[in-house]
Image: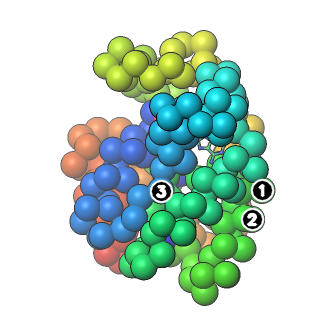
Amino acid sequence: MNLVLLGPPGAGKGTQANLICEKYKLSHLSTGDLLRMEIANKSEIGVKAKQIIDEGKLVSNDIIISIIKSFFNNNKNSSGYLLDGFPRNTEQAKLLDKLMLELEDKISCVIQLDVEEKHLKERILSRGKEEGRSDDNEKTLLKRLETYFNETMPLIKYYEEANLLKKVIGVGEIMHINQSINSIIDHL
Ligand code: ATP
Ligand code: MG
């Protein structure tokens, strides 16, 4: 089983991803987490990515490809994957389709976590205080939202047309949202 989590910054993708991966024994691919690891290690990719992330833009597809490749190489015998933060634009979605063909596998479902903008700002700013992520500030958030609307939102239609999209309201108790997601997965 391979799942994709789709949603704006602050939608709760990471939180739900951890719960889903634990329950269904999936390997968690978070491109955001992997990029932050590159930044912490001050690698070549990390140095390039830091500036772009702090501007609220998407890092280049070349960087994403190299990160994705090493993730799949390191998680070869996995029973399934949960993709969090990838794909984020149409080119990446097409890349994922190609990758699934190569693995002789398919996307089982794309779960869209739907959260209104007013909640996102609150969540991101409080996370900024707690975790100190340099892109969790008001100015970068505005740009991240714009990037989401322009580049990532088209994927909703892309996956709707592929009959893969399931929408979940991402507001309320974490465990309640998690139950809605679990019931979708259990019916796949
Ligand atoms: P949240 O952590 O709340 O889910 P988010 O989705 O904006 O918010 P991450 O997924 O951690 O945060 O991504 C942080 C940043 O890393 C993005 O704003 C972007 O610059 C970069 N990034 C992450 N994944 C990708 C990707 N697939 N393609 C391009 N850039 C990416
Ligand atoms: Mg995240």
Nearest to viewer (mark 3 / mark 2): 3
Q: Amino acid at mark 2?
A: Lys
Quadrant of the picture in which ligand 1 is shown = top right
Q: Quadrant of residue 43?
A: top right
Q: Which quarter of the image is occupied by the C terminus?
A: bottom left
Q: Amino acid at mark 1?
A: Glu
Which numbered tag is attached to residue 46?
none
Q: Secondary structure at mark 2?
A: helix
Report the side of 46 relative to 178 (left or right).
right
Which residue position is annotated with label 1?
A: 91
Mark 3–mark 2 CB contact (< 8 Å): no
Nearest to viewer (mark 3 / mark 1): 3
Which numbered tag is attached to residue 94?
2
Task: Please name whichever residue, 87 or 7, is drawn nearer the observer in this view of the structure.
Answer: 87
Residue at 57% across, 61% down: 70
Q: Quadrant of residue 152?
A: top right
Mark 3–mark 1 CB contact (< 8 Å): no
Q: Secondary structure at mark 3?
A: strand
* Residue 26: image location, x then y, percent: 36, 68
Q: In the rendered view, would you say 48 is above or below 135?
A: below
Report the side of 135 relative to 64 (left or right).
left
Q: Is residue 155 visible?
A: no
Q: Is residue 89 visible?
A: yes
Which residue position is annotated with label 3?
A: 29
Mark 1–mark 2 CB contact (< 8 Å): yes
In space, the residues marked 3 and 1 are separated at their CA atoms by: 18 Å
